Image: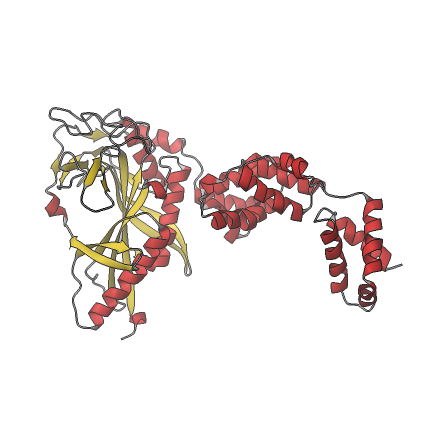
Amino acid sequence: MSNGDYETIVGLEIHAELSTKTKIFCSCPTEFGGEPNSHCCPVCMAMPGALPVLNEKVIEYAVKAGIAMNCEIAEISKNDRKNYFYPDLPKSYQISQYDMPLCKNGYVEIDTKEGKKKIGITRIHIEEDAGKLNHDEFGKKSFVDLNRAGVPLIEIVSEPDIRGAEEAEAYLKKVKAILEYIEVSDCKMQEGSFRADVNVSVRKKEDNKYGTRTEIKNMNSFRAIVNTISYEAQRQINVIENGGKIEQETLRWDELQGQTISMRDKEDAQDYRYFPEPDLGLIKITKEYVEKIKENLPELPESRKKRYISEYNLPEYDANIITSSKYLSNLFEGALAICKNPKSVSNWIMSDIIGALNEREIEPDKIPFSAKDLGDLIVLIDKGTISTSIAKKVLQKMFETSEKPDEIIKKYGLVQISDEDTIRKLAHKILEANPKSIIDYKSGKDHALGFLIGQAMKETKGKANPRLLDQIFKEELNK
């Protein structure tokens, strides 16, 4: 039986740290970094007698996420104790939610090769993050840092509607974009504020019953998640085809070896011995509270995408890429407000800016210049102050130095040559040096004109106005 006879089933449990100023049950700061154990207090260190107090902002942000992902918001929910023992969990239990989550029965829509597809969301619940273990380089000691303990999380649990690595990546990117747009999480994967547990199983296409799943914990890279799903699905198919049985277990992804490695048996809900958190009361949400949040929700990526296509005639592909990141979308909107040229802004983002981000291996939130700077650059092109080729050099300098485009142009003498007499003298010089190109042009070889313009641009190091060059070369050649 071939691999094509199987389908891969994926379920994702996304953990997103909320961008509140303080932790979920105490007033310690949530900011990333800091000296180990410097953002702690008796509550998040689980000192005897210290009691939790629920941060109301956590509820607001979680409800925002639930509304943005089409969830039902529970009028009454509660916190529960999830018991497990690990060195970076001070209380030996985590305050989470079990049978009465804050949000449930939602969905997110993704684009697939077959068209739009809804990925169901079972639940979104609030919980506290654990601390962090730092291991010494010799593997003999581990140190506990509790700065992250008590940082508020939402866990977004999908239905097993995802088929394969490509759909998983599309879903993750869509959820990340939504959370960024509504500004409840910074979603910085490199800092662990957006990560996922990945559940993978396979089954023959004619089967209705799900196969045994494995779980790969705490993944914070799209590329690693895609590679993990692809590898783990193939591993499971090989086991089944060779007469083996898939064990329900927790795995980790080894990036160097490019394979999953077993860690332990997979826990079920009963293993955590959930029970209601006795130190916290019920969470009661009114319909008025939900409506108020809904009214103040910002425009979401799908709405922006449709608007960009209808208002600015952007291709669907371009609109999809730009709106997939709040930072790219805001860059587009801000630059557009300056230059009033949507197609030009889109082209710069889709080509040079995304290319520069990929080359530098940085995310859009790290773009070192403002939307106004990009708009100003495009205005300079449209006015004829600089050519497109010069603008590409200016953009590179903007990435390198964060300087304003006009400052860079002045500093490096990059103003476009648009004086007609200067351009005509240059054309004469190029024509005298290339008599064969004159013959080629007059015999109908169109590439000759392009060659001559290229020589003139080379002579002026890209500063000559290309439209004026084209005009004057044609005048001289047609005499």
The answer to which of 115 and 260 lies nearer the viewer is 260
The answer to which of 74 and 300 lies nearer the viewer is 300
Q: How many marks?
A: 0
Q: Quadrant location of the C terminus?
A: bottom right
Residue most toward the right?
Answer: 479
Q: Is residue 472 above or below residue 380?
A: below
Left or right: 329, with 403 as reference point: left
The answer to which of 266 and 322 lies nearer the viewer is 266
The answer to which of 195 and 397 lies nearer the viewer is 397
Question: In the figure, residue 297 lies in which quadrant?
Answer: top left
Left or right: 371, with 132 as reference point: right
Q: Is residue 296 above or below residue 430?
A: above
Q: How is the image coloured?
A: secondary structure
x, y percentage for residue 225? 32, 54
x, y percentage for residue 43? 18, 26
x, y percentage for residue 265? 14, 54
Residue most toward the front?
Answer: 138
Q: Quadrant location of the N terminus?
A: bottom left
Residue displayed at 67% across by 42% down: 381
x, y percentage for residue 37? 24, 30
Viewer can see residue 314: no
Question: In the figure, residue 257 lies in which quadrant?
Answer: bottom left
